[in-house]
Image (cartoon, rainbow, N blue to C red):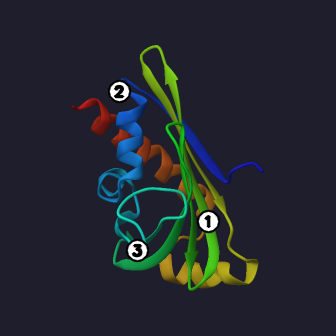
């Protein structure tokens, strides 16, 4: 299934360094556009099946989510996001080793039921989630590149 938004960037850092940043709740919050932090609920760190409570912010709007890690390997970190018990999205980071470091692709899939979308517009202030997520991904990847290459 094609993602609703996706972009990639080449990073002059090891795939492990990038994986450590995207799979760390604090590290990811320093790079992400809306995600501002989280807390592991049933694990001490990233692993398949681990759940975390995330907090997202956009302007004055704040909304919590609960996510479950579905992939946690050297080449992919991904999680399914729920809000009020409903599936709302999937986020995925694919990490491919290159001669100069790695290429990271961030993708997301909108999983919200149609009837729930107007409610989330009120909660998040985002009318066109695909367009906003595309911009957010591009900004996040630029920050991720700076963070990974700054070591």
Q: Residue at x 41, y 63 (%)?
A: 34
Rounded to the nearest angstrom, the CA distance separating label 3 from label 1 is: 19 Å
Disc on the earlier residue, 2 or 1? 2
Q: Report, in whole angstroms, how far the alpha carbon at label 2 lies from the one at label 1.
A: 28 Å
Q: Secondary structure at mark 1?
A: strand
Please state which of the two labelled residues, at mark 2 or mark 1, is closer to the viewer: 2
Label 3 to label 2: alpha-carbon separation: 30 Å
Up the image or down, 81 lies above or below 136; here it is below
- Compare residues 66 and 132 and report the one nearer the observer: 66
**Mark 2 residue element:** loop
Residue 41: mark? 3
| Residue 150 place in picture, x, y as percent | 23, 32
Circle 2 is placed at which residue position?
Answer: 13
Label 3 vs label 2, nearer the camera: 3
- Quadrant of the snapshot with the C terminus: top left
3 or 1: tag closer to the N-terminus: 3
For residue 127, what is the image quadrant? bottom right
- In the picture provided, is 126 more to the left or to the right than 4? left
Outermost residue toward the left in this view = 151
- x and y percentages locating residue 6 in the rendered image: 60, 45
Q: Secondary structure at mark 3?
A: loop
> For mark 1, does the 10 Å Cα neighbourhood hold few (<14), some (14 to 19), or many (20 or more) residues?
some
44 left or right, relative to 65: left
Q: Residue at x 69, y 68 (%)?
A: 111
Q: Is residue 125 visible?
A: no
Q: Position of residue 149 (x, y in %)?
A: 29, 30
Residue at 42 percent of width and 16 percent of height: 100
Residue 91 sits in quarter: bottom right
Q: Which residue is mark 1?
A: 89
Q: Is the C-beta separation of discs 3 and 1 under 8 Å?
A: no
């Amino acid at each position: 299934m094609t993602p609703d938004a996706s972009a990639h960037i080449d990073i002059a850092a090891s795939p492990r360094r990038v994986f450590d940043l995207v799979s760390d709740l604090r590290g990811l919050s320093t790079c992400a556009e809306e995600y501002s932090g989280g807390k592991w609920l049933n694990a001490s760190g990233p692993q398949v099946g681990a759940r975390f409570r995330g907090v997202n912010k956009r302007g004055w709007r704040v909304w919590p989510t609960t996510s479950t890690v579905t992939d946690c390997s050297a080449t992919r970190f991904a999680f399914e996001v729920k809000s009020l018990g409903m599936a709302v999205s999937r986020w995925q980071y694919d990490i491919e080793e290159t001669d100069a470091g790695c290429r990271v692709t961030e993708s997301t899939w909108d999983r919200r039921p149609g009837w729930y979308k107007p409610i989330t517009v009120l909660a998040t202030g985002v009318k066109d989630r695909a367009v906003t997520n595309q911009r957010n991904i591009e900004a996040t990847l630029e920050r991720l590149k700076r963070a990974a290459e700054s070591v």
